[in-house]
Image (cartoon, grey):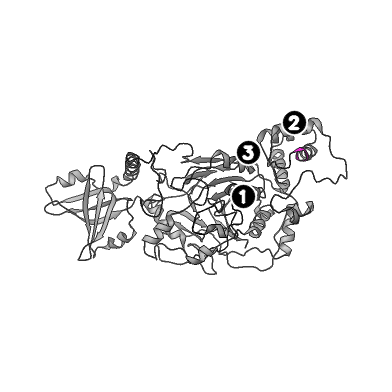
Amino acid sequence: MPLEEPARLAQELASHGYTADREAITLLAGADNPAEALLLAVEATPEDALKLTAADVHDALETRSPAAPGDDSDHGRRDPISSDENRETDDDHAPAAKAAKRAASGAKTSVESSTDEGSAPSTEPSTGDDPSVSTGTTMSKPAIDRGDVPVETKGSASGRSADPALRSLEIGNNMTGRSTGTGEYGDFVTTFRDRYKRLAGKLRGRINHRNATALEASPGGGDAGMVGMVSDIRSTTSGHWLIELEDTTGVFPCLVMKDKAIAGLVDELLYDEVIAVDGTLSDDGSIMFVDDLYFPDVPRTYEPSTADRHVQAALISDVHVGSQEFMADAWNRFTDWLHTEDAANIEYLLIAGDMVEGVGVYPDQDEELDIIDIFDQYERFSEYLKQVPGDIEIVMIPGNHDAVRLAEPQPGFDEELRDIMTAHDARIVSNPAVVTIEGVSILMYHGVSLDEVIAELPEEKANYDEPHKAMYQLLKKRHVAPQFGSHTRLAPEEKDYLVMDEVPDVFHTGHVHKLGWGKYRNVLAVNSGCWQAQTDFQKSVNIDPDAGFAPVLDLDTLDMTVHKFS
């Protein structure tokens, strides 16, 4: 059969609000009249079903006949979002009709212009003097608005022409189902030893490395170098910096003089990250005077991979279904737009955590909930997800509001939640995970540690208005959450899944509800904002969210455009 027929059927099912397994699609495509077979299958599917199975299709084709011409039955089509008293007509559910209706009521698209450095959602691109920000990437400033411009629509989801045979999607660093930690002291030792070994391997070639024991045994004087984990940072009475580095043999003190050019790098250090230092030993061999300091970092010569065809991925995060402030209208405009010609090349949707608002996440959260049961929140999220065209591949990781353990790395959702979120056969993986799409590696991390980086580092190096700058720091450290024992909860595993073994082509986070992007040594860092308006709790902690934005990445060029739906 033609390759486009299964894709067309999947898209048409999505327009009815359903997804289907592969065998069901194959059966429909092999029918004498696939279109009639699809309508029969939809009509025969139970009202509470979200997904057509092969058994549903078999039963429908064996027991039912095609609808007669002019039959006005609704073929099982239903609105999974609205309450009964607010249901729309069947025609209102067609993607074109929904988009046109919302466009007429004020749906807007944005005009985007180019900027090379990161951008917060303002009419001016963010500036700065970071020389490592690469140029040449076309991105968008989302706050410039064309005004009342209708969203261009297509007649139905079947107008999309994606060929599934051309797709390639691989998941790496997924620890779901592989957790080994019990919380014992020895588990933490194992985790830190693994971290040290892997990151030290990226640093030893830069210096004449000696371990702590060898340095202690040295007679003193002469050049020295060490790779270690930062165990302590403190200033001396003279204003110099004393850094204690720990390796697998012991701890050794290293002094950074305040008049050294590298003194400013001390402000970027976090506890438990792995660095290398180079310098000279004191005459008695008791301390090292540091001349150079190195991070594992992204190589300056790094060149990212790109796809060999024009295909796009939408990057979003922090949907927060279940909150009174969830922006359903913006979400509806977004999913309607995904059915239009403008979005025809979007074949992937990557969601970086916090699908739902959760329960008991922050004080008095129950007063701000629209849905108070966590399972009902996921049921509603799954139904909103059904509005996405059925041919789009979806990858999701959990966040700190989701119903998984808070400690990172977070495994993907358990079977009970997976059974709820069956729409599109979305791939549900751990936080963090590496998603490689048609050769482009995208590190997905929800981003809880960004709070810690922003709290610990100087404002010009990490702040909420420019979240990509905090992401640069994590790229430099080659670890998504280096500091243990503070704000970020970390779980011990045999392997430290938070280490960036390989440099990603794209780094995608959420959590802080702020939109920002930029390039660090050719790695595109994107924080994709949220779909939740400001809550009372956010007002109390002075968080002004950037809501209703969808960054869209061209995988063949790594150019990015941000679309505004709020």
**Residue receiving disc 1:** 381
**Residue receiving disc 2:** 58
Q: Position of residue 106 (x, y in %)?
A: 70, 65
Alpha carbon separation for disc pair 1 and 2: 29 Å
**Is residue 48 in view from this perspective?**
yes
Q: Which quadrant, please, contains the N terminus?
A: top right
Q: Does the CB distance between marks 2 and 3 fall below 8 Å?
A: no
Q: Is residue 534 magenta?
A: no
What residue lies at 28% left-to-right and 51% top-to-bottom? 231
In the picture, residue 234 is in which quadrant? bottom left
Q: Nearer the viewer, mark 2 or mark 3?
A: 2
Could you tell me which secondary element the residue under label 2 belongs to? helix
Q: Tag 2: residue type?
A: His
Of mark 2 and mark 3, the one earlier in the sequence is 2
Question: Which circle marks residue 474 in the picture?
Answer: none
Of 133 and 256, the residue lying toward us: 256
Identify the magenta region: 41-47
Q: Tag 1: residue type?
A: Phe
Could you tell me which secondary element the residue under label 1 belongs to? helix
Alpha carbon separation for disc pair 2 and 3: 25 Å
Of 402 and 359, the residue lying toward us: 359
Q: Which quadrant, please, contains the C terminus?
A: bottom right
Mark 1, residues whose alpha carbon is within 10 Å: few (<14), some, or many (≥20)?
many
Left or right of 219? Residue 409 is right
Of 358 and 63, the residue lying toward us: 358
What residue lies at 33% left-to-right and 55% top-to-bottom? 270
Q: Tag 3: residue type?
A: Ala
